[in-house]
Image (tube, rainbow, N blue to C red):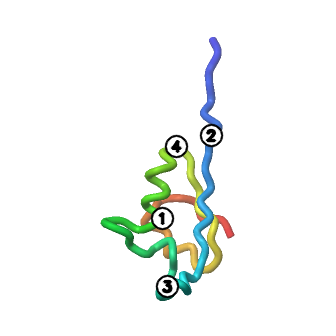
């Protein structure tokens, strides 16, 4: 029997100071009804997605993803 393993993963680069749009943590800014980061994660629709961001990783805890510096 041959088993297949899903090796597809995504990495979201979640940086930026949003200086041109008023400042703040750009991935956490709301566009429409969700944050930019939530929209990107939903659009990727992959089983394994990590977030690449500097600073305190706890600010992304609600997304339930690994945060890599």
Along the line of sight, the residue nearer the viewer: 55 or 20 = 20
Q: Is residue 66 left or right of residue 36?
A: right
Contact (CB < 8 A) between labels 1 and 4? no
Q: Earlier in the sequence, mark 1 or mark 4?
A: 1
Q: Position of residue 21 (x, y in %)?
A: 48, 83
Q: Residue at x 33, y 67 (%)?
A: 32
- Residue in the image at 53% along x and 58% along y: 65
Q: Tag on residue 8?
A: 2
Sequence-first disc among 2 and 4: 2
Residue at label 3? 24
Q: Are marks 3 and 1 in contact (CB under 8 Å)?
A: no
Q: Residues within 10 Å of mark 2 (few under 14, many from 20)?
A: few
What is the crowding at mark 4: few (fewer than 14 residues within 10 Å), some, or many (at least 20)?
A: few
Looking at this view, is 50 or 18 the one in front? 18
Whether residues under marks 2 and 4 lie with C-beta atoms below 8 angstroms apart, the answer is: yes
Quarter-of-image position of residue 19: bottom right
Which of label 3 and label 2 is nearer to you? 3
Q: Which residue is mark 1?
A: 37
């Amino acid at each position: 029997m041959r088993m297949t393993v899903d090796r597809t993963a995504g990495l979201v680069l979640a940086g930026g100071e949003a200086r041109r749009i008023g400042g703040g943590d750009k991935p956490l800014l709301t566009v429409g009804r969700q944050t930019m980061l939530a929209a990107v994660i939903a659009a990727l629709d992959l089983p394994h997605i990590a977030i690449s961001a500097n600073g305190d990783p706890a600010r992304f805890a609600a997304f339930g993803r690994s945060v890599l510096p």
